[in-house]
Image: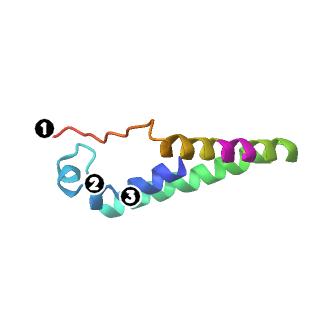
Amino acid sequence: MIATSIATMKLPKIFPEEWEKSPYHCSNGVLAFFCIAATIVLIVQIYFNLSSLTPALIIGQVVFLVLAIVFAHFRYESGNVKIQTSYEED
């Protein structure tokens, strides 16, 4: 989720024409403010969620995350996954 809120800040640079036409269009400053605020809220939420876990559970979560990333990487590299990017313009 943090990556999503950070990547959202790049939308005006990646899709400038589509961003201008978007019903969610706002100035870059407003977009940056909300994306940074969302990132801070997510970091605080992660801190509070992790603070209630035991060290063993935290290690288990990290191991699971690493395994999921490794699985996704090898699955993508296997060639069995075809990513099709698409978006509609009006």
* Residue type, numbered disc 2: Cys
Indicate which disc residue 9 carries: 3
Total numbered circles:
3
Label 2 sits on residue: 26
Q: Is residue 52 visible?
A: no
Which type of secondary structure does the marked residue at label 2 adopt? loop
Q: Is 63 left, or right, of 38 in this rendering? A: right
Q: Are marks 1 and 3 in contact (CB under 8 Å)?
A: no
- Could you say where residue 14 lies in the image, as x and y percent from the top left? 28, 58
Whole-Å distance between the Cαs marked 2 and 3? 11 Å
Instruction: Please state the extent of the stretch shown in magenta in the rendering.
Output: 62-67
- Give the mark nearest the N terminus, 1 or 3: 3
Q: Is 89 or 33 nearer to us in this picture?
A: 89
Residue 59 x, y percent position in the rendering: 80, 47
Residue 49, horizontal then vertical, whole percent: 72, 43
| Residue at horizontal 50 percent and vertical 42 percent from the top | 78
- Tell me the tag on residue 90: 1
